[in-house]
Image: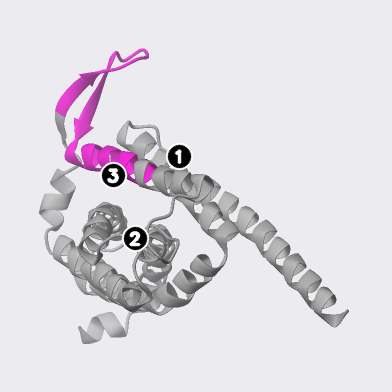
Amino acid sequence: MPELLSDPAVWLSFATLAVLEIVLGIDNVIFISIAATRLPEAQRRTARLVGLSGALVMRVALLFSITFIMGLTYPVLTLPWFGEAGSIAMSWRDIILLAGGLFLIWKASTEIFAEVEGETHGPSGAIRTTLAAVIVQIMILDLLFSLDSVITAVGMTNHIEVMIAAVVVAIAIMMLAAEPLGNFVAGHPSTKMLALAFLVMVGMALVADGLHYHIERAFIYAAMVFAGAVEALNLWRQKRRREAAGGH
């Protein structure tokens, strides 16, 4: 351990991996924030903490199962497919990514439908669900994002201590960001719709990965940053107009 702490290369790999883990976890935080908005105010914090704590436990457990994780990339079945090859070899990782991507598309699409159609249940005017149902949904996505995160970590460094430290730091930052992000999304319907559209994009990218058509995440995150900047300008314009109207 002391030799790791004195090695600049280890610190560089730790910093790089921590940033990557945070970037990979953005999708998870957005999903948790949106899922928690379906709960009563008193239960939202619990859902966020349980969801992110589950992500931490799952990622650390998977890191200690590196051999198993690497084995997930070996083909386990072959499916007929279009193109010159005529078939596609599917590993357990591919199957998990495919199933998780379809789940994410379905979940985000149903949320968009509810927002557009204005479905309401209960006195609060918002569709409600149970804490257990939200936590189950979060855990399913935790498994998907944790798998992607751990495979990235394994490819970045050979020191499991560095991997675990980077994951813990990333989850801690995500825990701090989850509540303000959730409150912001809940208070701005247009931002929530944009976040749901992002989740559909991520789901499509995961499905493509599962089918061996890799989509560079840089393109998706660049689109997110651009759309987020446009949304920030719209929110700023609305705020300026309200201030001007209040002044008159």
Give the numbered dot on residue 100. Answer: 3
- When asked about the image quadrant of residue 65, the answer is bottom left
**Residue 5: image x %, image y %?**
29, 84
Query: Picture quarter containing residue 61?
Result: bottom left
In the drawing, does residue 15 fall left or right of residue 99? right
**Numbered mark located on residue 128 in the image:** 2
Residue type, numbered disc 2: Arg
Q: Where is residue 176 in the image (x, y as percent from the top left)?
A: 40, 80
Q: Distance between the residues labelled 1 and 3?
A: 16 Å
Q: What stretch is highlighted in magenta?
A: 77-105
Tell me, yes or no, whether the highlighted magenta stretch contains residue 148. no
Above or below: residue 50 compared with residue 81: below
Q: Is residue 49 left or right of residue 222?
A: left
Nearer to us of marks 1 and 2 is: 2
Say which label, 3 or 2, has the lower sequence index: 3
Of circles 1 and 3, the one toward us is 3
Residue bearing the label numbered 1: 215
Q: In this view, does 38 lie above or below 222?
A: below
Name which residue type carries label 3: Gly
Q: Nearer the viewer, residue 195 or 187?
A: 187
Helix, strand or loop for disc 2: loop
Q: In which quarter of the image is residue 53?
A: bottom left
Mark 1–mark 2 CB contact (< 8 Å)? no
Among the two numbered marks 1 and 3 on one chain, the one whose residue lies closer to the N terminus: 3
Residue ID at (88%, 79%)? 248
Cα separation between marks 3 and 2 = 23 Å
How crowded pointer 1 is (Cα within 10 Å; few <14, some 14-19, many 20+) is rated as some
Q: Is mark 1 on a helix, strand or loop?
A: loop
Gap in Å between the C-alphas at discs 1 and 2?
A: 35 Å
Q: Are marks 1 and 3 in contact (CB under 8 Å)?
A: no
Q: Residue 10 carries which label?
A: none
